[in-house]
């Protein structure tokens, strides 16, 4: 109550509550768009071993040993389409390859993500 006896009006209202919930939900949804693989590889680059990568991501789709004894692994992720869900895809591509390169000590030293190509 104020000095005049009138009740103090709250600044919070149901409309503001819904707006806050909508903004929080949108923020969470946008953060969830970052694929787990992308986030993991960004942190693993430069120190994760092939075994650690395999433990986290599973068996690669394809492997290749280069002349300098480094290895390139490809992980392929295809969209499982459900209304409103795009799976691992950002940018609308129906299939994405993660290309990982390991040095001669089997440490991840480079990775990239690109739309799938025929290998």
Image (cartoon, rainbow, N blue to C red):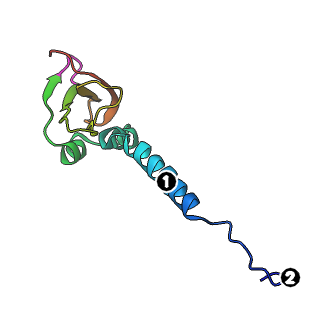
Question: How crowded is the residue under tag 2: few (<14 C-alpha within 10 Å), some, or many (20+)?
Answer: few
Q: Point out residue 73 in the picture as x, y percentages from the top left corner.
A: 20, 29
In reply to whether residue 67 is colored magenta, the answer given is yes
**Observer-nearest of 69 and 53:** 53
Q: Which residues are magenta?
A: 65-69
Q: Residue at the spot x=82%, y=81% of the render? A: 2
Q: Is residue 2 left or right of residue 115?
A: right
Q: Give the residue number, with chain letter if any, for mark 2.
A: 4
Vertical arrangement, residue 91 with respect to residue 23, above or below: above
Q: Position of residue 5 (x, y in %)?
A: 81, 84
Task: Quadrant for the C terminus, please.
Answer: top left
Q: Which residue, given by chain and number where applicable, does mark 1 sit on? A: 24
Question: In front of the other: label 1 or label 2?
Answer: 2
> x%, y% of residue 52?
24, 46
**Quadrant of the rendered image containing residue 95:** top left
**Displayed quadrant of residue 113:** top left
């Amino acid at each position: 109550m104020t000095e005049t006896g009138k009740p103090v009006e709250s600044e919070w209202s149901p409309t503001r509550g819904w707006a806050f919930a909508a903004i929080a939900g949108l923020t969470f949804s946008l953060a969830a768009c970052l694929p787990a693989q992308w986030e993991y590889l960004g942190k693993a680059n430069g120190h994760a071993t092939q075994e650690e990568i395999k433990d986290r991501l599973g068996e690669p789709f394809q492997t290749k040993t280069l002349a300098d004894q480094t290895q390139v692994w490809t992980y392929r992720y295809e969209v499982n389409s459900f209304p409103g869900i795009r799976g691992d895809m950002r940018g609308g591509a129906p299939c994405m390859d993660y290309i990982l390169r390991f040095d001669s000590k089997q440490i991840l030293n480079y990775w990239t993500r690109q739309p799938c190509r025929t290998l």
